[in-house]
Amino acid sequence: MKHGESDFFRYLPLNRAFFRLPQRKLLELQARREYEGAGEYPSYIGRDCERFARELATAENMAGISVWCQTGGWHRFRRLAFLENAGDDTWIRLNATAAIDVFRHGKSVEESVGNATVVEFLTLADTVIHELLYIEDFARQKLFFRRVRIPPLLHAYWDSLFINHAVRKVLRHFVRDPERALRSAEGAFSLFPKMINLAREADLPVEDIEHMRDLCGILLLARRYYLLPYDEELCAELRAAKKAYKQRWPKDSRERYRLKISFEPVKVTSRTLGLAASLLLRRKRGYRLFDHLFTLNLLGFAFRIFKPRDKRKMPKFLRKSAMGVDALFK
């Protein structure tokens, strides 16, 4: 079983099924983090492994762990672990090693890494992931739509970063403390000079950290766009940042993130969005009467009637990625 009720994301509590089901169970972990760069930059899971190991100490009938090192995700990143000529696998190897060391050998992160400079670097990188890639205020909210838990990461998905009015509307509705979200992002971004120095000192792939810095610079601008009043100058900054990113990290050298930027207004008012969210989304695992009457039955029927017959009219991201939007309404 995966560690949380959704996929391999942060901020998810350990799945209670580990403690409730009598069957033999494996904990699934992912070293090549599909939602966090897939090995393009550090996304360390050592501390998560320590936490899972502590919590699972009281779970019965645990068979062990399974670690995904190669596959996972509908993205174009091509770094693979433990293979020649498949790119630098430093970050994937660190995660795979952490999982084995913590669960099989009972080691701490410090013992697994074996280098204080690298531990300090990974701690800073972990802060960047938690506070800048994710928006903690949104990520900690438990939201369900029909049979699916809403992922804690919406604006960055696999190899795409979505900066548009629709995402802005949704995040402005759910993020309850935008000032804190902005402060945490600013603070996380300020860690990059020290991270680059530590990477050089520890002989880690510095170029990966420079790429992560440039990507996170766009994420920081995006967060301002999501949470601050609309500003044309900020939109211009985002367009310029996208151009600079594509020039600095061209896809003909290696596949990088796709930056999907659009400032076209969405014709949905905040009041309408709030009403739709209160009706269609729930904050508890169990179903409400409204879900049995509408969300689980009538809504799926309506989707099948009104969805475009020509699949090309659906956004490519929804048509080509993972299970597709149709699976949400079955």
Image (spheres, helix red, strand yellow):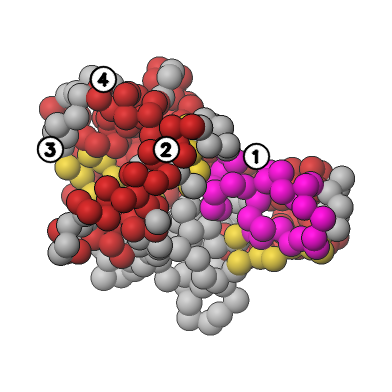
| Percent coordinates x, y for residue 302 in the rendering | 27, 48
Q: Is residue 237 visible?
A: no
Instruction: From the image, tell me which residue sits under label 3.
Output: 264
263 shown above or below 224: below
**Disc 1/disc 2 C-alpha distance (Å):** 29 Å
Task: Choose mark 1 or mark 2, whichever is in front.
Answer: 2
Q: 79 or 191, which lies in front?
A: 79
Residue 225 image label = none
Per the image, label 3 sits on a secondary structure element best described as loop
State the quadrant of the N terminus.
bottom right
Mark 2 and mark 4: span between their CA atoms?
A: 23 Å
Residue where numbered disc 2 is placed:
293
Q: Nearer the viewer, residue 190 or 260?
A: 260
What residue span does the magenta drawing correspond to? 1-29
Q: CA distance from mark 3 to mark 2?
A: 35 Å
The quarter of the picture where the C terminus appears is: bottom left
Comes first in the chain, label 1 or label 2: 1
**16 magenta-colored:** yes
Residue at horizontal 28%, vertical 62%?
Answer: 319
Asked if residue 197 lies left or right of residue 18, the reply is left
User: Can you tell which mark lies on residue 13?
Assistant: 1
Could you tell me the amino acid type at mark 2? Leu
Amino acid residing under circle 1: Pro
Predominant secondary structure, magenta span: loop
Instruction: Compare marks 1 and 3 and give the one earlier in the sequence.
Output: 1
